[in-house]
Image (tube, rainbow, N blue to C red):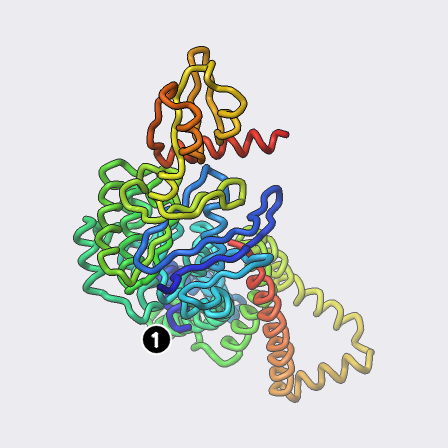
Amino acid sequence: MIHLIKKEVILQKKMLWFGFFYSIFLFVAFSNPVLKEFVYIMTAFGIAYITILGAIQSEYKNNSDIVMNSLPITRREIVLGKYLSVFVFTGIALFVVAIVGLFFHLAPLPFDHRLINGNDIIIALISIVFLASISLPAYFKTGAQWMRVVNMIVFMLIFFAPAQITGFVLNNQEQVWLQNMLDLAQHNIGLLIISVAGILFILLALSYRLSLRIYSKRDF
Amino acid sequence: MPHILELQEVSRSFKGFKLDRVSFSLLRGYIMGFIGPNGAGKTSTLKLIMNLIGRDSGSIKVFGQDNIIKQREIKQRIGFVYDENYFFEELTVDEMKRIIAPFYRNWEEKLYRKYLKDFDLPPRKKIKDLSRGMKTKFSLALALSHQAELIIMDEPTSGLDPVFRSELLDILQTEMKDDSKGILFSTHITSDLEKIADYICFINNGHIVLSDTRDEIINHHLLVKGPRESLNDRVRNLMLAVRENEYGFEGLTHHPVETRKLLGDRAVYERPGLDQIMLYTVRRDKHDSSY
């Protein structure tokens, strides 16, 4: 398994360097008081996204499934390796933004950035895992082409859903069930995070099962 | 002697094409040439062996074990060279090796370095900048560096210059000095096989037409050239296929004794090449299917 993940990192070595410089650019561009709250999440999400997609596109372009499936590994391992690489790339992306953020925090610059915190890590991780859960089965079924379309839809969801949810909450404030949920969110953030993580874990498990089913039946 | 590879009644349907009850086997210590025209089913058969495509029925055994159930173990002992480059083009030769090598427990780094040197492969060159011949050499270096016992090659010589083709065949012959190995080599360039193949398996339209030792196949066929007037129905029935022109005919028979008896010195006889056997057999199959 470690060799499959190593393969992903070798493939995206250059892209990770790009991610490093991209994050410096975003930390400068997002230095105003509103945007800088989200800079860690958005930058980590961006780096993880381009590296995960980059590795997939490279495999698709070179039709390298043929080589990978000729090696002494099973299709299950190939699928699992792809899912694990999502966490590895997200981990690397978070590490990069944490280091860049630390630099901006310590450096004597006209603007300042806070250090990365737990919320940044959790939200970035949740967003990437959500995106991967939806788009990886599309990749295993059709290759990188359709995955891009699915990604775009999920992207739109990630960007537009918060505004829609906020609007819904404001218009339905009297609803008792909604008030209970908001109370829970305000006073028991730990439970909320565990709930979201649980739902996401189920989504990820279903996504993995579906990808495995699709990939096991595929002809190369 | 145990079979290193055995296919029994393997079938697989595709849209507009079917591999139909494909059966053949390869013994350890031998090279089998897998021949047939383009689109005959060579690549599909090799993909079935490598479990890159699934089969509808039949069995495939490699080293005596099922190729799907034991694929992990089996693929440790298979070296593969494909007709196209499926490596990551944007990586260098060495980076690609760093991806492939760790999967093989018997990887021999020294041997790999030796092949790179022998093949003049620059380790830091990107794969996309290698010529087609160099890419095949790289593929071959990887296939030969992990003590593979079965080497599967899909059209490795197509599109290569004669010098490298000859070099490749020499390398394969050297590999076969060790009797524990077997090579399955698909090609439509039959002249490559005249030099190295011990066995020939001929596929056409998804069916195995012939599978035997090269010498048996050649000895069982005879190329006949004679005047047109001697081509009567009895002679015609002995022929696999015939080409006629205003002066005479040329045909291939797989009844050499009867044909010689019937035509005597009214015809000229030649030992056919594999390409002629392939050509006439394909022609016969086309003729048969047109009825």
Q: Residue B17 in the image: x percent, y percent?
A: 59, 43
Relative to B251, A190 lies left or right: right
- For label 1, the residue is A106
Q: Residue A9 in the image: x percent, y percent?
A: 38, 65
Chain ID of residue with mark 1: A
Depth check: give the residue in front, B233 or B225. Answer: B233
Residue at 46% x, 53% y is B24
**Whether residue A24 is visible:** no
Q: Residue B284 in the image: x percent, y percent?
A: 52, 31
Depth check: give the residue in front, A80 or A173. Answer: A80
Label 1: how many Cα within 10 Å (few below 14, some 14–19, many 20+): few
Name which quarter of the figure residue A20 lies in: bottom left
Q: Residue B87 in the image: x percent, y percent?
A: 37, 53
Name which quarter of the figure residue A72 lies in: bottom left
Image height of B190 relative to A113, above or below: above
Residue at 49% x, 31% y is B240
Residue at 37% x, 36% y is B274
Q: Amino acid at mark 1?
A: Leu
Residue at 31% x, 62% y is B148
Image height of A68 relative to B192, above or below: below
Label 1 sits on a secondary structure element that is helix
